[in-house]
Structure formats: C-alpha cells, structure tokens
Image (spheres, rainbow, N blue to C red):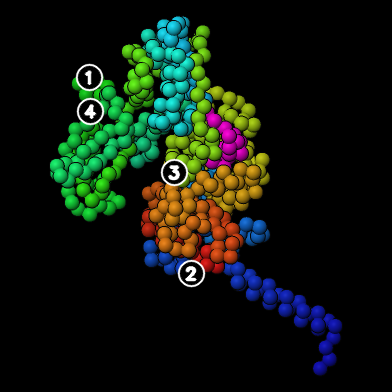
Amino acid sequence: MKITHLSVFVLFILLLACQSVHLLADQQPYQIPVPVKQKLDKAGVPESAAGIYVHEIGADLPIIAVNADVPMNPASVMKLVTTYAGLEVLGPAYSWQTILYGHGKIEAGVLHGDLVIKGYGDPKLDLENFWLLIHRLRQTGLHEITGNLILDYSHYDIPDDDPGAFDGQPYRTYNILPEALLVNYRSTALHFMPEPEKNVVRVVADPIPDSLVLLNNLKLSNRTCGSDWRSFMDIEIQTNQEGSNHMLVTLNGSFSAQCGRRSFLLGLHDSATYTRDLFRRLWSQQGGVFKGDVVVAKAPANLVHIKTYHSPPLAEIIRGINKFSNNIAARQLFLTLGTAGSISRSRAPATLDKSEQALKQWLASKQLFFPELVVENGSGLSRNERISARHMGQLLLTAFQSPVMPEFISSMPIAAADGTMRNRMTGTTVSGVAHMKTGTLNSVRALAGYMLNKSGQRFVVAIFVNHALADRSGVAMDALLQWIYDR
C-alpha cells in the first residue's frame, strides 16, 4: 500500500485531534467533580442550584465552570467585592475621621458650651477606640463640659429603614443600620457565666448603659452544650419603661453549666442614648465632668476645633469585615466608596446611589463588566444582591495581580485556623492552605477565595448554592476544596 504525503498529513492531523480530545477529557472544564456531586446529591441539593467556578492562576481556562454564568445570591461573599474595591479606591492606609468641636469658649480646661462630635462613617469606632478618642480629648486639657453633647450624623443621607425588615430581629447586631457616627455598633454584650457552686447563672451587660435594666430569671442546667445553646433561653425586650428611655431585658429559660462563659450581642438602644451614656461613663472615668444631655443636630457654625480622631487603617479594618463577616463595617465601607477616593466625583453626603456608581465605575476601570451584578448594601446581608460564580472568580483573578493583593488575601479566613473558617477542614490536608470567605443566609451558602493544591499551584474558587436545603451543602463545598488540593 502506497502512503502519500497527503495521507501522512491527514494522519498527523487526526493524531493531533485525538490528543486534543484526550486533553479536554482530562480537564473536563464543565463537569462537577464526582465527590462534590455525591455530597450535593446526599444533601438533596440539585446540581442546577450550585454555581461553581475554579481557575488556576495563570491558566487560560477554568478547570470547573458549572452554572458559572447564573446570577446567584452570594450572601457575605459579596464582602470580597466591597473590600477589594475599598483597598483600591481608598488605599490600604485610608482612615476615617471623627472630629470634635467646641460650641462655646474654652477657658482653663472648661468648655462653656456644647461638645460637638461629627462623624464621617468610621466603621471601627468600637469600645476600645471610643475610649481612645475620649482619652485624647482629655489629653487636650479639657476636663469640664457645661453644655450638651451634640452628635452630627449629617455625613450620611440614606433611607431610615426598619432594622428588623430583613428577618424580624431588630435587636440583633448584624441588623444595625449604618450611621455616620456609630459608636461601638450600638451593641451591648450579655456575658453568661455559670456558677455551679451557687446553682445560678450570672449575667453581666457590657458596657453597662445607665438606661438598661436587666432581669435575670435563668436557671442553671447541666445538659450538653451545643451550638444551639441560645435556643434554651428567651430574651424579652421592652422599651420606654415608666415613661423613660430605659430598656428592660428579661431573661427566661435555662443555661447549661457545660457551656462555660458565653456571650450574646444585642443592639438595644438608639444611637443618641447609647452614645450619651457611654460618653458620660468613660468621660467620668477619666476625670471629666459632664452633666448635660444629648442633642442630634447638624454641627452649628462658629465652632472651635478641638481634636480630629483617626480610625485604624483600612487594611486592618477589612480583616474584621472578611474574617468575621462584620456586616455593619462592610456597609459603612461601601458608603465611603461614593464620597472618597480618586474614583469619586462628589463628596458629602454619602448615599447608596453614589457608592453603587463608584463601584461600577471602578469595575469598568479594571475591564470587569458584570451586567448581572446587583449590589444593595455591599455586605451580602440582602435578598437582592447577585453575582455569578464566574465573575466572582474573575474578580479574584484580577485582585491577585493587584498591588493590594497581600492585604486583600490576608483579610480572608484561613481554613481550620481563624475567622468563620476556624472549624472547617480541621484535620485535613486543606488546613492552612485555603483563604476562603464564607457566606450564610437562609437558603444560601457560599464560599470563595484562594487556595494551594499539593503541588503548590494556586487556584481561585467560587461556589454558590441557592436552594432551600443550602444549609446542608457545606460538606459538598469542603469536598470541592479537598478535590482541588488532591488534584
């Protein structure tokens, strides 16, 4: 049989085609890994409810892209969009200002008038930092304020929403709404401490606002302490007791001695009352004198500048946002995008529309076009926010080439080490090699971030599950990380 040059050429082309087919079969870019599929099936979650995107950094194509273009609710994984934008638009060293003014003359350490505090959205004016602000105010030599405390919240122009609209839990701290002057997230921590020798449960409120009344009817039990320990107690909250602004918190039910010390955060007071009580207490502890009340108003004219307090840098603040999924801090960062940084054309007041426009303008500057993207508040605490798994993956690929990449990745929880991933993948080979942001809502579970496989190759990962049984899908997500590591 005579073999022509044409026949040799055809055979060569066929061999190349076969090799390409085998390579594509090995990659299987649109097929869900078998272990992941098995875990989803066992959980009762159909493959159609999961969006998955896995891409090795530096590669041309993803290794997995399942329902990757379907817009899905990412829950708190949306914080990755907000924090990456914040790092690039504002810069890792960005800090928020809180300015203190005197409305009156200051003579011999006495302010004959009002103290004005104007906020600009500091997302970390927590108990320690508010104490530091007051300490620095005291260091100016001021020791007495004869007038009132004026709080200026005018830097924000946002809807006065119902904090309980999301899930009917208005006193839960994750539902606290953004404020330009938000002190300690308006939160009160209830610390539960069993005392078996007295057969009682001691409860301490911290900080202790003057307007809080705590009625402890808890009984000490010895049942096994699980993650549902709060379900054995009932917390009843009543406002405006005896015509005042006092809050009555009544604790009924039981608390297990096996739980040890536990804490529960509540947002009980309006911002003005909370800030007044906390200011009065901390100011007095540092030797200051203040007997006035609180007034919420825009700062008047003819003020005397006393002190400008600066927040910790953004690079530090986003660690709390991503590692511990701090919703209120994420929302305040999102609002800052529209009033600060080179991408913003207008300044105060901060609005949601300005922030959304600034975010989309920044994405376009990165050549990232996400037509399905819906951002309501930037925290993921939303039923409306949407992004596809592919676009979340592309965002992470772009961020890896950014100058702010080290700050961005280090802000994410580490598998089996810290944050919301502290108890995930423990005792596995994935421990310590995955930086993953988690997302949790009713009917939503999400996971996205970076990880190394056993050969040292780095991958971006995004997996969203939107389904009534999404709460069972965590094992499938863990199986995906393990599959990537072993691959």
Other-residue count near label 1 (Cα within 10 Å), few / some / many at <14 / 14–19 / ≥20: few
The picture places residue 373, in percent across and down from the top left corner, at: 55, 44
Query: Count the marks: how many?
Result: 4
In the image, what residue occupies the spot 22% across and 19% down? 243
Where, quadrant-wise, is the C terminus in this rendering?
bottom right
Mark whose residue sits in front, 2 or 4: 4
Q: Is residue 445 magenta?
A: no
Image position of 418 (left or right of 259): right
What residue sits 27% from the left and 24% below the top?
211
Residue at disc 3, secondary structure: loop
Q: Quadrant of the N terminus?
A: bottom right
- Give the CA separation, mark 3 to mark 1: 37 Å
Residue 213's disc is 4
Observer-side mark, 3 or 1, equals 3
Q: Is 84 within the magenta?
A: yes
Circles 2 and 3: CB atoms closer than 8 Å? no
Q: Residues within 10 Å of mark 2 (few under 14, many from 20)?
A: few
Q: Which residue is mark 1?
A: 243
* Residue 255 sits above or below residue 145 on the image: below
Q: CA distance from mark 1 to mark 4?
A: 14 Å
Mark 2 or mark 3, which is nearer to you? 3
The answer to the question of whether label 3 and label 1 lie on touching residues, with beta carbons closer than 8 A, is no
Nearest the eye: 330 or 316 = 316
Q: Which mark is residue 34?
A: 2
| Identity of the residue drawn at 59% across and 62% down | 456
Q: Is residue 369 visible?
A: no
Q: Which residues are magenta?
A: 83-96
Q: Earlier in the sequence, mark 3 or mark 4?
A: 4
Q: Which mark is residue 325?
A: 3
Q: Residue at x 28, y 37 (%)?
A: 190
- Measure the C-alpha gap from mark 2 to mark 4: 56 Å
Give coordinates of residue 38: x percent, y percent.
43, 68
